[in-house]
Amino acid sequence: MNKAGLKRFLRRLGMIKISDGLRYRLMYCKNFYDNRAFKKEFPQIAIPPDYMMYESFNLNYRNYYNSGNNTAQILKRLFEKYINFQDTRVLDWGCGPSRVIRHFSKLCPSSEFFGTDYNSNTINWNKANIKDVTFELNKLMPPTKFKSDFFNMIYGMSVFTHLSIENHRNWIDELYRISKNNAILILTTHGDVYRSKLMKSDRAKYDSGQLVVQAKTKEGHRTFAAYHPTETIKLLFADKFEVIEHISGKVENWGLSQDKWIVRVVNKL
């Protein structure tokens, strides 16, 4: 049985989170010495609790910090192709334990930064440890606490990848509500490069243009996965957003990168 088949079997048995818990313990042991060395080398850097980090990313402190900085710089360059950062409000939707936004707020000091997440423990940790960012707690389903027409920029890194089709629609409506007209959003999805991870039946569904959701676990958790055909995403964005750039994911030396969708809010008076 291959890896995709094993995951499907564990989902059917309702054991996918148990399996993921075992993987967490393995990652803890694998990264123990490197993580200890990082904390000794950089004692001033606030590091989230181990499972909090693992649930949103992986369990290597150095990768958490360095990849967050790299992602923030990539996002800054992408945003700047379409919008000026001067005196803007920026939201990290599904911010997790601030892997990205802790760096982004330093890169653009003239902007106001916000983070929101459905995990109360994560938001509490962020509030206690990350400065220059305003954090808010949301629920799995909208709405957020933000006013309508509030943000100039929003990014969501691997959030749609853990939502049901119903919540894809719900959150697209909410992101539209809290965005200003002509706001720019950058959102990532599991695109064509992830097709190889699907079982034959799910590949057929994906190839027919349907969103593939692998559930049997808590929605929003890392073990809940959604895969996104290009045409499906375009249809979901239609009417409220204009797709201005689509960057397909690819095979990297560290694994598979997600698709990046850069969209502009339209049709707001």
Image (cartoon, grey):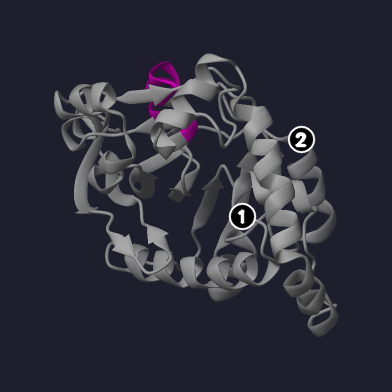
Q: Secondary structure at mark 2?
A: helix
Is 218 positioned to the left or the right of 35 in the image? left
What's the mark number on residue 213? none
Residue 31 drawn at (x, y percent): 71, 65
- Which image quadrant: the N terminus? top left
Instruction: State whether residue 164 is above or below residue 234.
Output: above
Residue that appears at 79% across and 39% down: 121
Q: CA distance from mark 1 to mark 2?
A: 19 Å
Residue that appears at 38% across and 69% down: 253
Closer to the camera in the image, 240 or 269: 240
Instruction: State whether residue 198 is above or below residue 254.
Output: above
User: Which callout, 1 or 2, points at the residue further toward the start of the chain?
Assistant: 1
Prevailing secondary structure class for the magenta stretch in the rendered image? helix
Q: In the rendered structure, which amino acid carries the disc numbered 1? A: Asn
Count neighbours of disc 2 (C-alpha within 10 A) and say few if under 14, some if 14 to 19, many if 20 or more.
some
Residue that appears at 46% across and 72% down: 73
Residue under pointer 1: 58
Q: Can residue 132 be seen from the camera position used here?
A: no
Residue 50 drawn at (x, y percent): 77, 53
Closer to the camera in the image, 54 or 186: 54
What's the mark number on residue 120? 2
Looking at this view, name the residue that lies furthest to the front.
1
Q: Secondary structure at mark 1?
A: loop
Q: Which residues are magenta?
A: 162-172
Residue 9 drawn at (x, y percent): 48, 22
What is the total number of numbered labels drawn onto the structure image? 2
Contact? badges 1 and 2 (CB < 8 Å): no
When asked about the image quadrant of residue 249, the answer is bottom left
Is 125 positioned to the left or the right of 261 in the image? right
